[in-house]
Image (tube, coloured by chain):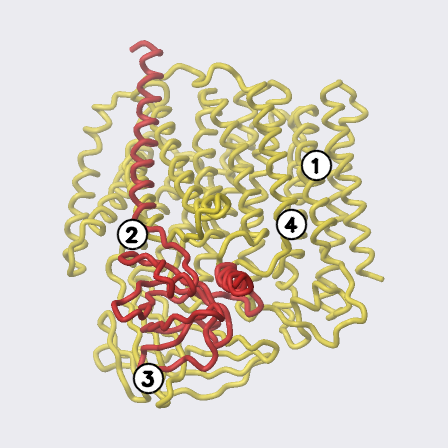
Amino acid sequence: MKSRYKRALIIIAALAVIGVAALLILNALNSNIALYVTPSEVSAGKAPKDQAFRIGGMVKDESVRRDGLTVYFVITDLVKDVPVAYTGILPDLFKEGKGAVIQGRMNTNGEFIASEVLAKHDENYMPPEAKHALEQAQKNGSNK
Amino acid sequence: MIPEFGHYALILALCIALIQGVLPLIGAHQGRREWLILARPAAQTVFLLLATAFVILAWSFYINDFSVLYVAEHSNSQMPVMYRLGAVWGGHEGSLLLWVFLLSTWTILVAQLSKALDEFMVARVIGVLGLVMSGLLLFVLTTSNPFMRLLPAAQDGRSLNPLLQDPGLVFHPPMLYMGYVGFSVAFAFAIASLLSGRLDAAWARWSRPWTTAAWVFLTLGIALGSWWAYYELGWGGWWFWDPVENASFIPWLVGTALLHSLAVTEKRGGFKSWTVLLAITAFSLSLLGTFLVRSGVLTSVHAFATDPRRGVFILIFLVLVVGSSLILYAWRAPKSSLGGKFSLSSRETFILLGNVFLVVSAGSVLLGTLYPLLIDALHLGKISVGPPYFNSVFVPLMAPLLVLMGIGPWTNWKSSDLLGVIKRLWLAGSVAVLAGISIPLMMGEFTWLAGLGFLLAFWVIASGCLQIIRQAKAGKPTRSFIGMQFAHLGIAVFVIGVTMVGAYQEEKDVRMSAGDTVSVGGYQIQFEGVNVVPGPNYQAMRGTFLLNKNGNTQTIMHPEKRNYFSSTMPMTEAAIDAGLTRDIYVSLGEELPDKSWAVRVYYKPFVDWIWGGCLLMALGGVLAIFDKRYRIKLKRQVA
């Protein structure tokens, strides 16, 4: 075989791999991205209806209530609240009055069913998404 | 006074590093011997200065000098000595000092072990390393000085994040950084060869063992990190596709591609431009990793409170390094891209294809990691890309790579009889298919993913066994050959571990009162109760669990929930009963209002094979480094 064809074949093979990878990536990105939503946006009805998403905010003081392994609490940006239910074991740094990021879906009663409560590993660290939600809410509040 | 000496040593090191970076390069360019011989003594001086700075920082931790801000923030007089020393790299400033210290360690190793290499090449390599060093030292001194004073001194330190108070801290970061930073040597060799225009097999032979060494450290570093996360984070997972994990994994993938591509350049003089490009990419990705970890732009378990100036500095440095090396590359890279002639059915083709898969998968991981940043920067909203993305992209890209891995070593350089190879591999293929069908059935549940995993793993193992038999008939195998077998076997062992855990693990979150029993994987775990136990700088709630099988108690497990005195943050310490074919993992959640406990119980079949496989890969790398041909060459050139 001539080396020109050979090179063309190798390039085609490489492009095929890249093409398949691109397809896989686009497909996977489509179904596996979680949008960050603030509690204010949730109560304004701006949350995705049939897709999992993430909420960043603070765990409201004195809102944590336990029923067996299920934990009920409220996540807030200090303007709007979203009630949350989570079944399972919470990360060590989950605490009332601290920042948290949770992932899950809304149910029909307006309750957020969390599938994951994200662990942060430094007590002085505030997840940027939680901070963002609080700042956002504050800004909107002072505009009104 | 002593910390000021450390600071002073850093400033001096920057000055000498600039000399190391500039004069030898100009000397090599203009042929001035008196400038280029400065390379070695300059590198030695920088090493001594940085070693001094490092020891001084460690000393400040050892004597609890809380007038040093960094010590006050990361240590505490109650902490055991081991963790006080580990805390040297437990925070941002110290870990960067570790970074530059390891960079100078690599530099000095190159300087000492390259006596046989021609002077110009050595001067250029050390010069490039000196430039990289200068940039990072400037970063340390302007934004992250670990010797900053805190006056008046603190009474006691703030203590290290309890999560980091673990033997993992002592080993994981130095290993990982040693690997990260080690790619700088491959990078320096590549740039030096571009500068000199001598991009030949000798260059590849020289940079190959160095690249392999860096790769071994990175492999071990990543494996240690994964193992640490497994037993310490209390979640029982071994890989989270966390941005910072990805930041170390992407250079690993590209480094693996580089190792194989270097083999072609050494043996056949081919793929020169590609190899150089990979070397530049691997190091740039290591720098990018440092940027991602240290700038705090990503949400991750490694994210700590940060200073935005740092991110900007590393980003500028990164752009400078990548930009200038790519310009140099475009200007000087050899024009003939594929080098020596080879046919389509040759080892070159297989290595090239494998390279494509490795690089593309590195790219897909990079994309998933940076995508949220990109979207945020374009103000399109805040998003996260979860593990499902990575799994659904990464696994399909790795599967063909494993198929290639079983065939590639059978092919010859230049040209090979592919039909003959396939005929010889029918046995390996049948073993693989048999394993892919029978093992999942034996485990009690067939899934396609598990079948595929076992098929690929046994394909690689069976092909390896046949290769060993063939080699044994042909004569004594070289260390390189044994190294390759170990590394490829390591991949197969790793795949078996991942497949087993992925398909057959059992995870249970349950509520337990004293006397309750829960069963996983054929074991019964009985909860006896929780009592309070004091530790050196914490108090622990300690659970007692009996691990029973068929009515006999196998062992007693003690997971803990610790409260450190210096922190409000509780810590979960899981209890793990490890075994060759399974781990039992118990961790305490929290105490519930009715005095029962939330308990997490896992059965993880073959999970230790994941890290065992990494260990085999690293061992393979070590064997390859000590292959005779590198030493014979050395002796001949010395004589």
Residue A105 position, x and y percent, is 31, 63
Q: Does the rendering let one see residue B611? A: no
User: Residue beneath label 4, please?
Assistant: B310
Circle nearer the viewer, 4 or 3: 4
- Mark 4 vs mark 2: tell me if same chain: yes
Please, what secondary structure does the residue beneath circle 2 have?
A: helix
Chain B: give its colour: yellow
Query: In this rendering, which labeled residue sits more in front, label 1 or label 2?
Result: 1
**Where is the C terminus of chain B found, in terms of image quarters?**
top right
Q: Position of residue B227 (x, y in %)?
A: 44, 60
Q: Are marks 4 and 2 in contact (CB under 8 Å)?
A: no
Q: Tell me the mark number nearer the camera, choosing from 4 and 2.
A: 4
Query: Label 1: chain?
Result: B
In the picture, the disc for residue B496 is 2
- Expressed as whole percent of the image width and height from the top left, the position of residue A87 reads 31, 73
- Residue that numbered label 3 is attached to: B527
Residue kind at label 4, given as amino acid type? Arg
Question: Local crowd at mark 4 within 10 Å, few (<14), some, or many (≥20)?
Answer: some
Q: Chain of mark 2?
A: B
Q: Position of B520 compared to B114: left or right?
A: left
Q: Choose the circle earlier in sequence order: 3 or 2.
A: 2
